[in-house]
Amino acid sequence: MSGRRWLTVALAVVTVTAGCKTLARQAFSNPVVEVKDVKVTGVGPQGGSLDVILDVYNPNEYRLDATRITYQVWVDTSQVATGAIDRLVTLSERGRSDIVVPVEFTFAAVRHALLQMSLRGTLDYRVTGQFTVVTPFGNITRPYSGTGRLDALR
């Protein structure tokens, strides 16, 4: 094959590959991740634990596998917990899934927040993080965040 013909074939292959990848990415819709709820699951002498429940919607017509979830938990303006969960979670096509993210915290980290809760009876929180899924087009990471208020009487 002559050099000119080889170059033409190579350019055609690159163009088709790039075009397919662009079309594939356009056919993919990012999952929608929201904080659904936060529940206190335990309290001990040194701290406690809570479950952050994420509501994840997969708008695609094929399943997605989530492989990593990171989180940061803020109470008022103080960060009280951070971490990551590396486990496989399957998201069904065009379906919603609740994903429970267990979080542990120390009382030292939430001392100011506990004082505010004792004075007001409520506690404002914010949860942020990233959600990584494996797609037919490679791994993607989507941020999520949510806010809420814990009521001491609830």
Image (cartoon, rainbow, N blue to C red):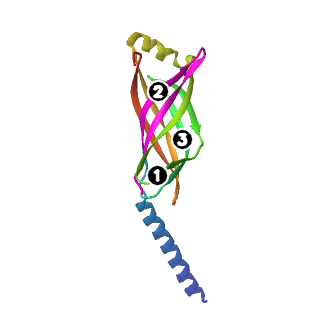
Q: Nearer the viewer, residue 84 or 2?
A: 84
Marks 2/1: CA distance? 25 Å
Give me the disc on residue 69. 3
**What percent of the width, then of the height, locates residue 116?**
43, 14
Quarter of the picture holding the N terminus: bottom right
- 110 versus 9 height, above or below: above
Region rendered in magenta: 33-60
Q: Distance of mark 1 from mark 3, alpha carbons?
A: 17 Å
Image quadrant of residue 28? bottom left
SS for tag 3? strand
Which mark lies nearer to you, 2 or 3? 2
Residue annotated with mark 2: 39
Q: Position of residue 108 (x, y in %)?
A: 57, 17
Label 1 CA crowd tier, 10 Å (few <14, some 14–19, many 20+)? some
Task: Report the amino acid beneath label 1.
Answer: Ser
Give coordinates of residue 31: x percent, y percent: 43, 49
Q: CA distance from mark 2 to mark 3?
A: 18 Å
Viewer-nearest residue: 86 or 109: 86
Tell me which numbered mark, 2 or 1, is placed earlier along the sequence.
2
Residue 33 position, x and y percent, is 43, 42
Residue of label 1: 92
Q: Amino acid at mark 3?
A: Ile
Mark 2 or mark 3, earlier in chain: 2
Please identify the quadrant where the C terminus is shown: top left
Left or right of 93 in this view: 86: right
Residue at horizontal 46 percent and vertical 58 percent from the top:
62
